[in-house]
């Protein structure tokens, strides 16, 4: 019985945290906090790709490697897969 109550309280805490997070997100969105009116690109205003001049940073002139860009992207995705797998394994162990 005690374990069931503990699980119940844990679920209730998670729901409460979720509601608080959604409330804060709604507050930020409705009050347009964090937006710079001079950089308003619509729905993509929060993404770095919409920043003026970002193309100069990713066009390949500033970073030269023997590994082609597709290889770097593949390694990044592979790293993400390993980190995700580690978290799944860690969560099962705990």
Image (cartoon, helix red, strand yellow):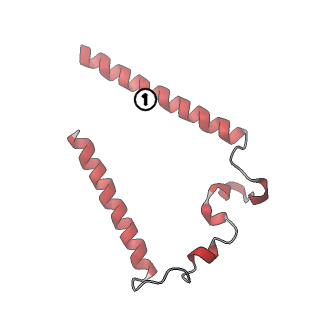
Tell which of 41 and 48 is nearer to you. Answer: 48
- Give SS at disc 1: helix
Residue at screen point 45% across, 79% down: 69
The residue tagged 1 is 14
Q: Is residue 26 above or below residue 39?
A: above
Disc tally is 1
Residue at screen point 56% across, 83% down: 61
Residue at screen point 55% across, 80% down: 62
Q: Position of residue 56 (x, y in %)?
A: 63, 77
Residue at screen point 66% across, 64% down: 50
Q: Position of residue 84 (x, y in %)?
A: 33, 54
Relative placement, left or right, of 32 versus 60 is right
Q: Is residue 75 above or below residue 3?
A: below
- On the rendered image, what quadrant is the C terminus found in? top left
Relative placement, left or right, of 78 versus 55 is left
Q: Quarter-wise, where is residue 38 in the image?
A: bottom right
Q: Position of residue 74 (x, y in %)?
A: 38, 72
Relative placement, left or right, of 64 versus 24 is left
Q: Position of residue 71 (x, y in %)?
A: 39, 78
Looking at the image, the residue that sits furthest to the top is: 1
């Amino acid at each position: 019985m005690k374990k069931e109550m503990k699980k119940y309280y844990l679920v209730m805490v998670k729901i409460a945290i979720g509601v608080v997070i959604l409330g804060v997100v709604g507050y930020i969105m409705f009050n347009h906090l964090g937006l710079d009116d001079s950089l308003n690109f619509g729905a993509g205003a929060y993404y770095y790709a919409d920043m003026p001049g970002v193309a100069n940073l990713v066009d390949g002139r500033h970073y030269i490697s023997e590994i082609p860009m597709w290889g770097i992207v593949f390694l990044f995705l592979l790293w993400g897969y390993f980190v995700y797998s580690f978290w799944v394994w860690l969560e099962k162990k705990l």
